[in-house]
Amino acid sequence: MGGVKGQGQLVFGLDIGTRSIVGTVGYKADDGFHVLAQEIREHVSRAMLDGQIHDIASVGQTILEVKKSLEERLGRKLGEVCIAAAGRVLRTVTVNVSEEFDSDREVLGEDIYNLSMSGIEQAYNEFQSKNDTDIKFYCVGYTPMRYYLNGYQMGNLEGHKAKKIGADLIATFLPDDVVDGLYKAVEAAGLHVANLTLEPIAAIQVAIPDKFRLLNLALVDVGAGTSDISITREGSIVAYGMIPVAGDSLTDVIVQKCLVDFDMAEHIKRSLREEKEEIEFTDIMGLPQKVSATEINEALAPYVDDMTARVADEIKRLNGDKPVSAVFVVGGGGMVPGYTDKLSEKLGILKERVAIRGEEVMKDIIFEDKDAHKDSLMVTPIGICLSFYAQSNNFIFVSFNGERVKLYDNGHLTVSDAAIQVAFPNEDLFPKRGKALTFTIGGKARIVRGTEGESSQILVNKEPADLYSQIRSGDLIEVKPSTPGQDAEYTLGELNELKAPVRINVNHKIIEFPKKAIVNGAIQDTFYKICEGDDIKVNNFYTVEQIGEFLDIPIGDNIRVNATPAVLTTKVYEDFSLEFEIGKAGSYKSSSESSEVNYSSEEDLDAVSDKAEEGAVHADADSFASLPDDDGTAADMKEKQAEKASGSETDSSEKENASEGDEKTDTPVTSSVTVMANGKSFTLTGKDEYVYVDIFDSLNFDLKASNGRKIITLLNGRAAQYLEPLKDGDVIEVRWEEK
């Protein structure tokens, strides 16, 4: 709010009452509060009822007139204002709060402020837990009832050394519509709220000084629409209350009695204070009239009786069902003749103990504005200004993704507080995982989580921030929601249960066999993508027949598993030994194809078992042979074939001897075969028979260029085996797997 030379910080206070608006500008100095200027405007219509704004635009216009008048008199602009709310639908919460330090140290003003803020936060949480309505409430004021120093009651904590401090604090709450209406009316006049308090809290700042609060007193602020009440005892304010009946209810009686409009009825009511015997007025017909003060007082008497009875009942309720020692009355509504006498009667205390407080309580108020009012009407307006120094409990406004948000300023607001206020989805603030994948393996449930997405992106005033960044009034907050991650994906080959092979001793050679995965009753290869709900079983055995199919070797006689006679269906597990005779030269059909494969000696097992150890034997879905992974495996197999070729002459002659009607010859039988490989025609010559691996002699394919990729070998559109025979017209495809 600023100040000028020789002055403290200027404070602009507005008492937005049901009948009138009072603006006060002043500053606090060592000798008291200085009132520089004061302006009063009555509402042109009944824009407020019972302390609640009904016509925001009309009230805002009246505030603007008060503001402009004060600015002209002061010669300066006013931008911030302190306001007070009437106690309509008032709720209070009393809490005890404490704070312990690491060691004994001096208590600072900041410590007391933080203690109060913790108390307000605790009171708010406690209130919200009991708020069973959909109405939002805001804390509009608080009062420390008593302080504690190391567990002992203390009047003022500041400057003392302590290990632990505490306080009993009373916090007051009002509905959002009451608070929001006040803020909007003030903003309509181009002002920003610097501090918000409760009217009885403001009034007590002036009407009951600290030195009187040791007594059990009540302050009643009788306005136009509400009668606000506060109770003091043992040096503290211990309770606040309100009844929605005040001066306007008496004015309405005069309206009916004298047949006048509301403004004229107000004139008649105020004339009663002047102790005139007759009051002149003009009725709604435009006719001049006279009425005696006695007649008006008699008409008001039953309503004053009812009003004071309700006030007395509320005072007793707040004071533990007993009357207070004395009552101070402020506000215009309490100046009606007979009000104080009736209130003392209802409370059952001496009438001298109920008195209107006015100029006599303003000894510390210096009126530099000589035209300022010094009666009980001005107690609350000046108290609103003084509340600015006593506590900082104002609201702030920020912009959250373009939406204007009002927050109660507890001194440590963060981005997360604003997000909660606008009900920003919690899941949009934190990284979202993609959909999880759940399946069973071996009868046990397993879950693979999706990846995390990106966190929300937060900017405060265009600068990077996070959820815990402090915010202040006017901040521009932008939050870009977090993004979801990718759904979980998993292949059979990634399962640990399938990574370790089954090692079996086959005819005295250790050969590694891939474990078999059965998904939902069907065999799948290691590249199978697991689906939601899949039931996976892992078999860590092979039957004798499957071992033969895997190695492309016919199983002959004398089958033994762990030196025990066995059959083709016998299961062979990890570290078992299997022995069998290689089947005689002839045809053997694997379960995955119908092409004939000839075997002639133990060398076939040597070649295949060597490649199985290197991971070069291919398995389709039925036989479980694996495609080659390593560089040069096809070349290695070709090398084995070349070694076998040198002994093929003897093998051929043996075959000829085994065939009836064939003549013996020393000349090897040779033939040729024409195939299509990778789109080109190749004719293979120089041998009597050809297998798949022979194509690498003619095909220009670099087996060293795998770069970690798997080689894909196809024959007539299906997965091929390296020792699979070739025939004219076969179509071959060899390529590296695409990643």
Image: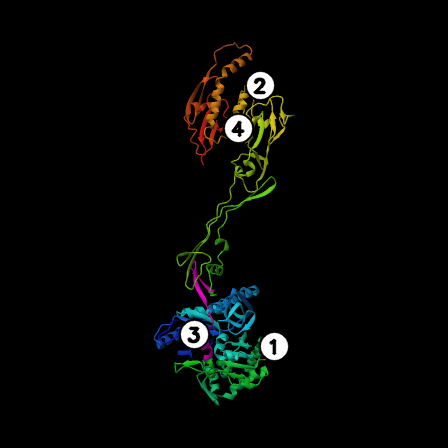
Is label 4 in contact with label 2 (beta carbons under 8 Å)? no
Residue 186 lies within the magenta run: no
Give the mark, 1 or 2, whose residue is nearer the N terminus. Answer: 1
Disc ID at residue 584: 2
Residue ID at (60%, 26%): 578
Mark 3 and mark 2: Cα distance apart in space: 112 Å
Q: Nearer the viewer, mark 3 or mark 4?
A: 4
Element on which disc 2 rests:
loop
Q: Quadrant of the C terminus?
A: top left
Element on which disc 4 rests:
helix
Of residues 734 and 411, the one nearer the viewer is: 411
Q: Nearer the viewer, mark 4 or mark 1?
A: 4
Query: Which residue corresponds to mark 1?
Result: 321
Give the mark, 1 or 3, whose residue is nearer the N terminus. Answer: 3
Give the mark, 4 or 1, whose residue is nearer the N terminus. Answer: 1
Mark 4 and mark 2: Cα distance apart in space: 22 Å
Disc ID at residue 612: 4
Structural crowding at the residue carrying mark 1, measured as other residues with C-alpha within 10 Å and reported as few (<14), some (14–19) or many (≥20) = few
Q: Specify the amino acid type for callout 2.
A: Lys
Structural crowding at the residue carrying mark 4, measured as other residues with C-alpha within 10 Å and reported as few (<14), some (14–19) or many (≥20) = many
Residues rendered magenta in the picture: 378-407
Disc ID at residue 13: 3
Of residues 51 and 701, the one nearer the viewer is: 701
